[in-house]
Image: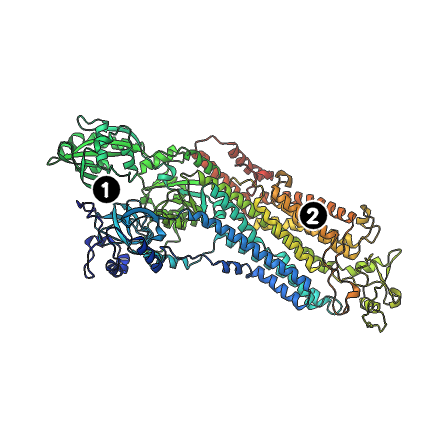
Amino acid sequence: HPCAPERSRSSPSEMCKPPLLDRDNQAPADEADEPEDLQTASEDSALKHRLDLQTGEDGLSEEEAARRLLQHGRNELPDLRTPKWRIFLSHFTGIMPGTIIIAIIIEGLLQEWPDMSTLTALLLLNGFVGFFEDMRAGDAVAALKASLKPEAQVKRAGAWRKADASQLVPGDRVALAAGANVPADILLGRGMQVQVDQAALTGESLPVSLGEGSLVKMGSTIVSGETEGLVAHTGVNTFFGKTAALIGSTHDVGNFQKVILRITRALLLFSSLLVTAAVTYLSLTFDGEGYGVWPAVSFGAVLLVASIPIAMQVVCTATMALGSRLLAAKKAIVARLASIEQLAGMTVLCSDKTGTLTLNKMVLQEVLSYAKGADDAAILALAALATRWKEPPKDALDTLVLRAECLDTASLDRHEQLDFTPFDPKLRRTEATLRGPDGGVFDVVKGAPDVVLRLCDEANRSSIGAVFAAKVEELAQRGIRALAVARRPEGGGMEMVGMLTFLDPPRPDTKRTIERAMQQGVVVKMITGDHGAIARETARALGMGDEIGASDSLPTILPGEEVPRTLGRDYGAMIEKSDGFAQVFPEHKFLIVEALRQRGHSVGMTGDGVNDAPALKKADVGIAVEGATDAARAASDLVLTEPGLSVIVDAIVIARCIFQRMKNYVIYRVACTFQLLLFFFVAVFAFHPRQYDAAHQLLPGHPNVYPLPTADLGSGPGGGDSACSAVQCSYSDIGDFGSGTDDSTTCGGVQCSYGFRMSDAEVGLAIPSTFNLPVVALVVIVILNDATIISIAYDHVVPSPLPERWNLPALFLVAGWIGLVACGSSLLLLHWALSSEDPGSPIRRMGVRESLSYGQVVAMMYLKISLSDWWTIFAARTQSFFFTRAPSKIVFAAASVATLASTGLAVRWPFPAERYDERADLDAQEPDSQLIGLGLEHVLFTWAFTLVWFLIQDVCKVLLYKLLYTFDVSGIRTEAEANAARRAKNEAILGKQPSKRGARAGGARRKARRGEMQLAEMPLEVELEV
């Protein structure tokens, strides 16, 4: 504990004057209490400032303050946020934008200007939307945090006033009182010593005693005492500012960013392997008569663009930004967006007691008298005389005494206070010397009962000591505190007058809040510096359990010592079993958090003081409660602006809703990637349209013969004057064409024959050797999906009743299975569509009267892939059947817009088709696939086919979830049973009978063993109501 402050009888005018020391004067003796690494580092600089500040008793004038503000700058730490221009450029760099840029370059080299323009539009759309969402999220957080700006009491032009601490300048005269945050490096003037908590700067848990001439550092907190001082350093020139610059230079990747990177890398690796195989096959197998190297590379690059999750970061950022706005409405300010994802997975909440679980407002219980003639009013009056009763209460105890109902405040003013010593955490008492109305001088002491009892004379101690001590012990066992009051007349002995009993009651909503938190699967532990008996009684009253550990059972580390990696192994089990800890120091909070994290828990930590900052920073979710110091707020991820814990439970529920939306999007996007990639991979190797065309030419009434469009293209390779020869020569060289190699059979000089029915725009063009979609069609699919899928941030979800986590193996299995079913249906439809020329084909037998031209086959597959992509979101968003939870109106509207737009494009394709009579180099390389508009019956059939397979896909998804749980794939059932055990323990702590949920969890384990697990009981499900 720090040394006791010296009592001072200085007059108010003499107090807090700046010290008149020259450069050679040594620091006052009490500066020896300050850690050497802080004191010596800036002592010389501080001494120089003592001569340069030039501040009078009235403080600086407004003009001089404005001049110094221009000279020294605002009292703010450097803005370490990333500049907006760099954020903007970040959306055009990296793996995913880089892939688009490569595709744009390839299309430019091939002079495919429409494709190049479409890809450029996709790049710009993704970049601008991402930048807009980032800015909107950042601006919202900045605007909310602006309301938390610190203030300072500053004296300018002879008047004290509250001012924005950022406006302080060197030389400003400021007032410091107990509980105040030190807004800059301040040189203390004459006056009483103050107790300063420098834990955020030194890691030292105990306050230090500082007095005249000492330099109090920015980021410290005044624990006790009152004084004035002069601002010596501001902003980056403070000790804290220089340290913060070092802290800001380190960047740690959050858990959410790690998850996104893992998903992106996995998809990119999978996509790259399949695309590389397909491109190699196209380039080598069909070289000369087929694709050629560059067109194959172009198709592969665009396919890669379509398959990787370009908009994942944008969608997740938008979703979390929406969550931050919802939390702000609940009086919780999100300082770091990614913390929303970690809040959803929080399993343990370590909560401070005073002010968080309790009201931080002392309520008087009874007044006990130990002196003759001392009634309640007299004892309260003496207690009030040991305060500065003419000033606002400085702490909860002063508030308790000065606002007591039976206190006669008029009688206090008849006394003159000659001296006053504020509460000191080491001495644990407050003293005052007074002159009564009769002129007599006497001392009054109030403080901890054992301390005040020792100050009483021996006779008084002997007469009341045993009874007094027994009463104090009894009160402690009931969780009630006591404040002793003693009086000593001038020249006499100290006599115990009485004892005030009081307690800090729990908040009215705390018990229900803790119950709600436990029902959410979150274990709440009380971490307090209070006495063990009081902590145990408070925990019992709140239904938290009474297994309260003591600080001597916790690990300790020396300053500067590295945190052991064995904390979880050595102390984790003990900490998990305890319901809380009492009489802890700040370093204990830090080590408790670290031990739990090493045990695999996601830990939340609440705090309000500077000494809580290290633990808040270490926790997965640091939560600064209402009224927290600036240091605590700066170290936190979530800042509460409303008292109590209830807002934290609300924040957990909202965070889990946000997590569900992000998880649904990830499943959807991975499923779409699987569908798209596998479809084109299989189509390239297994589906050859020319083979279908050759088979159709053998059908009765075939081949279909069309007059060749006239074009002045010169003589073809066959030497004829007609361009048809060029077409036929390229056909006749394909051995599997199936119609012979006699040019006159297939082309009568001005006619061409096909197995497919061809539209006017297609006549004269070769049937491709492999199936693919036009590059622009792939890009349109991506743009429509990315532009509308942001609506998932507003989807209806039901928060999970258990902590969330990213089970990526299970997620990829589900998404892959959903995508595989969609891919299978697309391949089936492709086969049917390519076979539609045959009257006996399935598509014709199902009522489609008109066969499809090859360009319409391409259009049908474009429509099918687009519809499957968007309808997959309805399967991905639930684990049960899709109809068990309706989507939000915004999601339904977005899906409607996307599907109707895709249908409209499939009916009337707006991009110019490539015609034979407009192309002069048909033999050089295979042209891009045409897309010819569908008729009404084709559109209806595609919708019906896709809808039927969507229902099949949904049933397959439900069956997969059941199998995953039954066979405990990726630990799903094990995790569910662990969560059920945690919930059962929580309900046991709450003193409840086994609830329906608990019975259902037990039944779930029995059903799981029999393979009868119901979908609504699965751990990944979000359908359970809170």
**Residue 594 visible, this orientation:** no
Residue at 74% from the left image edge and 64% from the top image edge: 927
- Count of number-bearing discs: 2
As drawn, which residue projects farthest toward the front? 63
- The quadrant where residue 376 appears: top left
Callout 1: SS: strand
Amino acid, disc 2: Leu
Q: Is residue 599 above or below residue 96?
A: above
The answer to whether residue 592 is left or right of residue 364 is: right
The answer to whether residue 135 is left or right of residue 922 is: left
Q: Is residue 810 above or below residue 25?
A: above
- The quadrant where residue 961 appears: top right
- In the foreground, 695 or 876: 876
Residue at 53% from the left image edge and 59% from the top image edge: 88
CB within 8 Å, label 1 to label 2: no
**Residue 764 visible, this orientation:** yes
> Where does residue 856 sit, x and y in percent of width and height?
77, 54
Q: Is residue 421 above or below residue 230?
A: above
> Where does residue 2 sit, x and y in percent of width and height?
24, 48
Numbered mark located on residue 422 in the image: 1
Callout 2: SS: helix
Numbered mark located on residue 900 in the image: 2
- In the foreground, 694 or 744: 744
Q: Gap between marks 1 and 2, in whole Å?
A: 75 Å
> Where does residue 563 sit, x and y in percent of width and height?
37, 54
Q: Residues within 10 Å of mark 2 (few under 14, many from 20)?
A: few
Q: Residues within 10 Å of mark 1 (few under 14, many from 20)?
A: many
> Where does residue 422 sit, x and y in percent of width and height?
23, 42
Numbered mark located on residue 53 in the image: none
As drawn, which residue projects farthest toward the left? 491
